[in-house]
Image: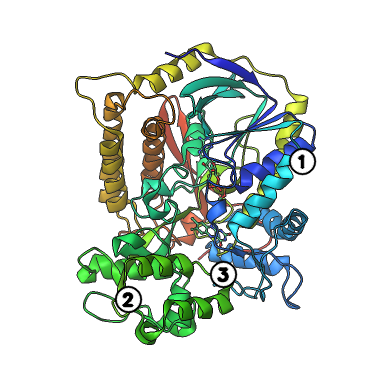
């Protein structure tokens, strides 16, 4: 086993997407010594880089718009489950957070204000994720004196002492070595968990690795509360067939309203027509209706539905791209178009799509200061819960990561200034080292990571998709727990440098832990609301369920409870 070197910092950040990088900048500006550890290269990994361009914030261009209106849209589309104190912060501070990025070059192409589905007014910017990340990277480089960025490394286990954060174990992929990082404050900004699902927008083109939820699972392992983990937002349409389109997300509004296409089931019947006529595709509702077609036995042989291009089938790909670009700026249709062109697929043949996991609405519970229930532990971005409620409004994730990323950096730095470094528990470090290097050892009944992940994704797809029911959730939770038995048998090739399969092995227990939390949270919520639909409880139950589910590990057992939603301004319908 490799020896474990020790590194010291004041603020340690897990994850260098938008939330983590914004947090790092702020903590460094406050004078803290900051170490940001990111699983991939900065601005070339994570979901922020992939964000399509819709960024919701009231930028003062629409006379009737206001942060209050943005607040109300967010609460209502989240089915009254967003904590209103957090949503106030989000909607009030988003414009300032976007404006300050402009100074570092984050400008979109000139484009009219976007009127995204679910918003009362056209609002926000068209600003692609890679521009945001490039600007944040540029800004972060101004703080090289006290901000260190460590790429191709990940945190594998958070460490506490006396219930307080003490640091973490980190794994360097380039060398295949572990390190102990001593830190007074830790910020978890590790993004989403879409890769628990076989179909997801979070792992485009089948390349997996960033969105495993590993930071959230590590926070859970030290006792942090996770809220509303049952709310997985599914994107109604991601490519299924031809295989080159797998997991590429298709914009249904573009596909139907703009290009005049039709959505059909395998029997050739059009569906979602009402939405198409109105030109809106609210994600939770369109996902549910599309999923019901498939579940009702009207899906294609590949398990999806058809997008029939109709009139647009006669247009060349160049014409389609021009049309879409005029309406939506540089649209993501480019990637779909290039792929189809590469395999000589004509739009005269229908494409197949299905829904895929897109965004985790639940996550680590935070206060307005991004504090968790563990002293010294902060969280920001998609890793957190309680902001988006039961359904995230389009364009709200980017403002979330900027607003709460800044707050996390500021508050973690303040905490680090006023606290002392906790002692590291060497036995915890030893256990983690044994776990990590144990995967390289030969075993009589060794199994591959692939096998265990395939089983996990199967049960997650079967039982934790857009439509759920009690008996299958019970069996999913039991099945996932059973998969833990296979963990000690995982065996990977004994290669230390850049062994991605080894990294996958290291994160697999984190994924199993989160899948179990999702199953147990889904079981606890005996109602249907937003992204959580129960066949056996088909209606919302406002009297009992205007509450968050809470999962917390206590004495190695997952305790499931509930807590009321924070209401400040907008009274929910209680009946
Ligand atoms: C295809 C797509 C399009 C989208 N379009 C939009 C849009 O138009 N508008 C909008 O508002 N939102 C959009 N979203 C959602 C939005 O992009 C994400 O919610 C947001 O970027 C998440 O930011 P984050 O900083 O929390 O996480 P990320 O940007 O995913 O960053 C997390 C980082 O943490 C790293 N990491 C993970 N685990 C560890 C670990 N254990 N140790 C160290 N590092 C780790 C990852 O490698 C990653 O780099 C889109 C999402 C997708 C998938």
Give the Cα distance between marks 2 and 3.
22 Å
Residue 200 position within the rendered picture, expressed as x and y whole percent measured from the top left: 40, 55
Q: Are marks 1 and 3 in contact (CB under 8 Å)?
A: no
**Image quarter of residue 396:** bottom right
Is 487 in front, or is 344? Answer: 344
| Rendered position, 92 above or below 323 | above
Side of 199 where 80 appears, left or right: right
Crowdedness near tag 2: few (<14), some (14–19) or many (≥20) residues, C-alpha within 10 Å: some
Please name the residue that numbered disc 1 is placed on.
142
Nearer to us of marks 2 and 1 is 2
Is 454 in front, or is 93? Answer: 454
Q: Secondary structure at mark 2?
A: loop
Is 104 in front, or is 162? Answer: 104
- Residue occupying image coordinates x 45% and y 20%: 432
Q: Secondary structure at mark 1?
A: loop
- Residue occupying image coordinates x 67% and y 67%: 124
Q: Does residue 572 show up?
A: no
Q: Are marks 2 and 1 in contact (CB under 8 Å)?
A: no
**Tag shown at residue 330:** 3
Side of 147 where 357 appears, left or right: left
Which of disc 3 and disc 2 is earlier in sequence? 3
Which of disc 1 and disc 2 is earlier in sequence? 1
Give the Cα distance between marks 1 and 3.
30 Å
**Tag shown at residue 346:** 2
């Amino acid at each position: 086993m490799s020896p474990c070197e020790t590194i010291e910092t004041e603020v340690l950040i897990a994850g260098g997407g938008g939330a983590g990088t914004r947090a790092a900048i702020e903590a460094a500006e406050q004078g803290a010594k900051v170490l940001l550890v990111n699983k991939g290269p900065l601005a070339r990994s994570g979901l922020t880089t992939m964000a399509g361009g819709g960024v919701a914030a009231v930028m003062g261009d629409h006379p009737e718009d206001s942060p209050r209106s943005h607040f109300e849209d967010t609460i209502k589309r989240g089915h009254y489950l967003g904590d209103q104190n957090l949503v106030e912060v989000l909607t009030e501070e988003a414009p300032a957070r976007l404006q300050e990025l402009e100074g570092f070059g984050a400008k979109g192409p000139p484009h009219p204000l976007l009127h995204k589905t679910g918003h009362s007014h056209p609002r926000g910017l068209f600003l692609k994720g890679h521009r945001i990340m490039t600007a944040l990277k540029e800004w972060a480089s101004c703080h090289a004196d006290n901000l260190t960025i460590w790429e191709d490394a990940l945190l594998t286990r958070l460490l506490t002492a006396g219930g307080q954060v003490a640091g973490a174990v980190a794994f360097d992929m380039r060398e295949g070595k572990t390190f102990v990082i001593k830190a007074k404050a830790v910020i978890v900004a590790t993004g989403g968990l879409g890769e628990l699902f076989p179909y997801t927008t979070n792992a485009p083109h089948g390349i997996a690795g960033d969105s495993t939820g590993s930071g959230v699972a590590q926070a859970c392992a030290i006792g942090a509360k996770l809220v509303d983990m049952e709310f997985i937002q599914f994107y109604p349409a991601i490519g299924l067939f031809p295989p080159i389109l797998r997991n590429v997300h298709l914009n249904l509004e573009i596909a139907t309203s703009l290009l005049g296409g039709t959505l059909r089931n395998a029997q050739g019947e059009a569906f979602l027509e009402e939405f198409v006529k109105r030109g809106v595709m609210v994600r939770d509702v369109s996902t549910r209706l599309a999923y019901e077609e498939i579940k009702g036995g009207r899906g294609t042989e590949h398990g999806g539905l058809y997008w029939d291009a109709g009139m647009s089938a006669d247009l060349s790909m160049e014409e389609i791209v021009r049309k879409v670009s005029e309406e939506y700026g540089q649209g993501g249709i480019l990637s779909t178009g290039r792929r189809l062109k590469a395999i000589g697929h004509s739009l005269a043949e229908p494409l197949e799509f299905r829904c895929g996991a897109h965004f985790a609405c639940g996550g680590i519970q935070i206060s307005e200061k991004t504090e968790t229930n563990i002293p010294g532990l902060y969280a920001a971005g998609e890793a957190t819960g309680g902001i988006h409620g039961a359904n995230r409004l389009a364009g709200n994730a980017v403002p979330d990561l900027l607003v709460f990323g800044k707050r996390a950096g500021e508050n973690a730095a303040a905490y680090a200034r006023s606290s002392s470094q906790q002692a590291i528990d060497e036995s915890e470090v030893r256990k983690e080292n044994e776990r990590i290097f144990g995967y390289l050892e030969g075993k009589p009944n060794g199994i591959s990571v692939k096998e265990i992940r395939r089983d996990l994704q199967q049960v997650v797809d079967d039982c934790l998709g857009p439509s759920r029911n009690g008996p299958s959730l019970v069996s999913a939770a039991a099945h996932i727990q059973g998969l833990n038995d296979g963990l000690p048998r995982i065996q990977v090739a004994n290669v230390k440098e850049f062994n991605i399969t080894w990294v996958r092995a290291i994160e697999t227990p984190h994924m199993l832990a989160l899948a179990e939390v999702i199953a147990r949270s889904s079981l606890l919520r005996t109602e249907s609301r937003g992204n959580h639909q129960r066949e056996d409880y088909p209606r919302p139950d406002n009297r009992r369920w205007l509450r968050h589910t809470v999962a917390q590990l206590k004495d190695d057992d997952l305790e499931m409870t509930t807590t009321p939603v924070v209401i400040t301004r907008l009274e929910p319908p209680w009946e």
